[in-house]
Amino acid sequence: MNDSGKGPAQSLNLNIINNHTLHINAIKAPLSPKQPFFIGVAGGTASGKTNVCHMITTQLHDRRVVLINQDSFYYSLSDKILQKVNDYNFDHPDAFDTKLMLSCLEKLKCGQPVTIPNYDMNCHKRIEPERQVQPADIIILEGILILHDSRVRDLLNMKIFVDEDSDVRLTRRVQRLAIERGRNIENVLDQYSRFVKPSFEDFVLPTKKHADIIIPHAGENDVAIDLIVQNIRTKLGQHDMCKIYPNIFVMFSTFQIKGMHTLIRDTKTTKHDFVFYSDRLIRLVVEHGLGHLPFTEKQITTPTGSIYSGVVFCSRLCGVSVIRSGESMENALRACCKGIKIGKILIHGHGTNGRQLIYEKLPKDIASRHVLLLDPVLATGNSAVKAISLLLKKGVPESNIIFLNLIAAPQGINAVCERFPTIKLVTSEIDASLNEKSHVIPGLGEFGDRYFATDD
């Protein structure tokens, strides 16, 4: 992207998340309707999906968890189809009433109770009584094609794919249907070869690419389940914060991002490694922030003569770094936005909580630009409030400011988002709280000193 905003922005599809227990005091912003945390668990038949859901539910005993099975949304079969039920493909997307499932999920998202069909696998019809489901903290959706429909995927906060060897899955299916349920083994194998296996390859396996987490050998993978539960717990804290302030955007936490956070937070990490991994994380935050710029659709012609429907970012940009730690983010911004102008603001602590503006150098036409405000650590929010107030005084519309951080404390988020509800705040992690010295906990120390090697 160039300074005029006419070039394409590179935006990684990484959305975060991670956090420790949040301690939030005196939040005055009104709470939005409680929304559940949606988890989708997909995978082939007999891959261990149910076992994964059970293990997650067991470990999250302190939260209200509801499990919804995609099988509940099978269409009831007519008497005509039942006459040739062995020729019916239960593993095809058209076998499910996805429209009804979406309607139920949307209601749960809005805090409304729903009625879930009760599907009988023996008669292949919906029967009474239906299941009443109340809103919950966590809703787990389990089924072979949970990740198939993009509308369902868009509702999910975490997407899991349970991966298991095909021979193991076939063995489990035969045991479950033929041995435990008394089905004819020849019919079971015939159905598998005609419908289950082809549908898995055509519809189920391709959804693996949409998963945030892939679990191999789910029945024996306690380590993966522990990591997932830990990740869910930390996400829930940030999920609650994002429900309070819809203008917070937290990057999705992959194990790669979590690993980089582990390195830059470690007191034993060398200066060289601290800078290297901080730069990597900053680049991801900048690219994620650029994804929140306004754009217009544009069609172009490719070298093959084909038409490609894309987008172009239509507004001019500039960066503003809060000296001095914010200057660590400038190179990443320049790498993503060719020729971008960057202004500077220096704010110094004054008294107990006050902040004094010492220096500012901003583009003269900043009022007509979208501003990316750079500061890697949001602690109390006092400096951020001072910097944003200056930008507003210079004529920058509040909605044109995107505030980029590596980590943020709930107190700082509260201070900024309550005062400026239309700015966008992008961060890679929300930490637990502040200590008595107003340092972010667990934090990463004095970022500027560690980055520029001016610490002890």
Image (cartoon, grey):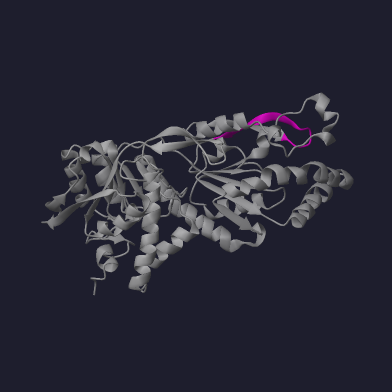
Q: Does 121 lie within the magenta span?
A: yes
Q: Position of residue 406 (x, y in %)?
A: 34, 55
Tally the numbered discs: 0
Q: Position of residue 373 (x, y in %)?
A: 27, 48
The quadrant where residue 330 appears: bottom left
In this rendering, does residue 437 appear at all?
A: yes
Q: Main secondary structure of the magenta part?
A: strand
Q: Position of residue 247 (x, y in %)?
A: 34, 40
In this rendering, does residue 265 appear at all?
A: no
Q: Nearer the viewer, residue 330 or 258?
A: 330
Seen at 64% across and 58% down, the residue is: 216
Q: Position of residue 336 (x, y in %)?
A: 37, 51
Seen at 35% across and 47% down, the residue is: 426
Quarter the C terminus occupies: bottom left
Q: Does 326 lie within the magenta span?
A: no
Seen at 25% across and 45% down, the residue is: 416
Start-end of magenta stretch: 120-133
Seen at 55% across and 40% down, the residue is: 153
Q: Is residue 422 above or below residue 339?
A: above
Q: Is residue 305 left or right of residue 439?
A: right
Q: Nearer the viewer, residue 175 or 43?
A: 43
Q: Is residue 108 left or right of residue 163?
A: left
